Image (cartoon, helix red, strand yellow):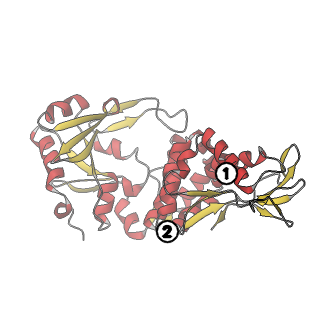
Amino acid sequence: MIDISACFPNYARAVMAALDVAGHRGYLVGGSLRDILRGVTPHDYDMTTDATPEEMLEIFRDFRVIPTGLKHGTLTVLSDGHPIEVTTHRVDGEYLDSRRPESVSFTRQLSEDLSRRDFTVNAMAWHPETGLIDLFGGREDLEKGIIRAVGEPQKRFSEDALRILRAFRFAAQLNFEIEPRTLSGAAACREGLAHISAERIFSEVSRMLEAPAAVRGFRAMLDTGCEARAFYHTVLQAQLAGIAATKAGVTGAEVDAAARKVIEAAGYGPYFGHGYGHGIGLQVHEWPSCNASGETVMTENMVASAEPGIYLPGKFGVRIEDLVVFKADGCENLTESPKDLIII
């Protein structure tokens, strides 16, 4: 049995104590509590409180504070140089864009705040006096290695489609299984991923690529049919568009440059700025010609397998395969729909 109190550092305890002295209550929540229960030291600590943003500004007047997202109830408190995010208990309003609530209202009830969270393993709270508060069976799911949505999965994912990718990412990072109803809910709501920005998709996918059980996360993505929105309709489609902008007579390097140009114009440049690679993987289906520099030249009517993908060099990657033919006036995609995402 993990002793949470023994794992709770003094600088975070000081923030919680300031709330207690003021007659309020702060609780450790989210990934920091989840990690402690797993026996892992958290990178940072998050709290939720019944104090309003205005009350927090007064309570933490002797601390250095950063109004990170004050209108949404979040204040970053610096304690002994460490940032602690403290957020007022809140209830989300209606979601109209599969991403963000139209409004946020504050509440004094911890249970209302926990019930809006994504997965049971992230919906627990702790305070030294109350101990662990687990309304949705998060600790049991944590022990069994299960990712389970809080409440009705389709409701959770229709509210915010990014939660679908978060489910895959947690499965990859924690090597957990996604509970069947939660997986089915992700599949039912996958079109909502069209509302997620390239930057958000990159953030989740890049963390999946680096995760210890990356294959598990990507398999879940394939099982739910989410790869089209997460990959093909985003970065891989941009790569194919770059290839299509070329024509017979170009070199392989020029095809690669054209793909990168379209990728960056489409807003997917971040995929390639953090040690990630990309490749079009042109596999020609006939003996290629070369120019004076020894570079492969795409001759007219040459057919090639275009294999756009992203990868973490030496570790993991994903790609698709499309057939293309180089013409004098352009490059034609011969594949009506993308083949399955391939894990490499």
Establish if 221 lies above or below 20: below
Q: Nearer the viewer, residue 340 or 271?
A: 271
The residue type indicated by label 1 comes to Leu
Residue depicted at x 57% and y 52%: 185
Establish if 99 lies above or below 142: above
Crowd around label 2: few <14 · some 14–19 · many ≥20 (10 Å): some
Q: Nearer the viewer, mark 2 or mark 1?
A: 1
The residue type indicated by label 2 comes to Ala
Task: Name the spot of residue 328 as percent of width and height, x first.
Answer: 89, 46
Label 1 sits on residue? 236
Cα distance between the residues tagged 2 and 1: 23 Å
Crowd around label 1: few <14 · some 14–19 · many ≥20 (10 Å): many
Task: Name the spot of residue 187 as percent of width and height, x first.
Answer: 62, 53
SS at badge 2: loop
Left or right: 340 with respect to 184? right
Sequence-first disc among 2 and 1: 2
Residue depicted at x 70% and y 46%: 258
Whether residue 223 is visible here, answered yes or no, is no
Left or right: 143 with respect to 211? left
Name the quadrant of the C terminus. bottom right
Res 270 label: none
Label 2 sits on residue? 213
Whether residue 280 is visible here, answered yes or no, is yes
Q: Nearer the viewer, residue 121 or 165?
A: 165
Residue farthest to the left, as pictured: 21
SS at badge 1: helix
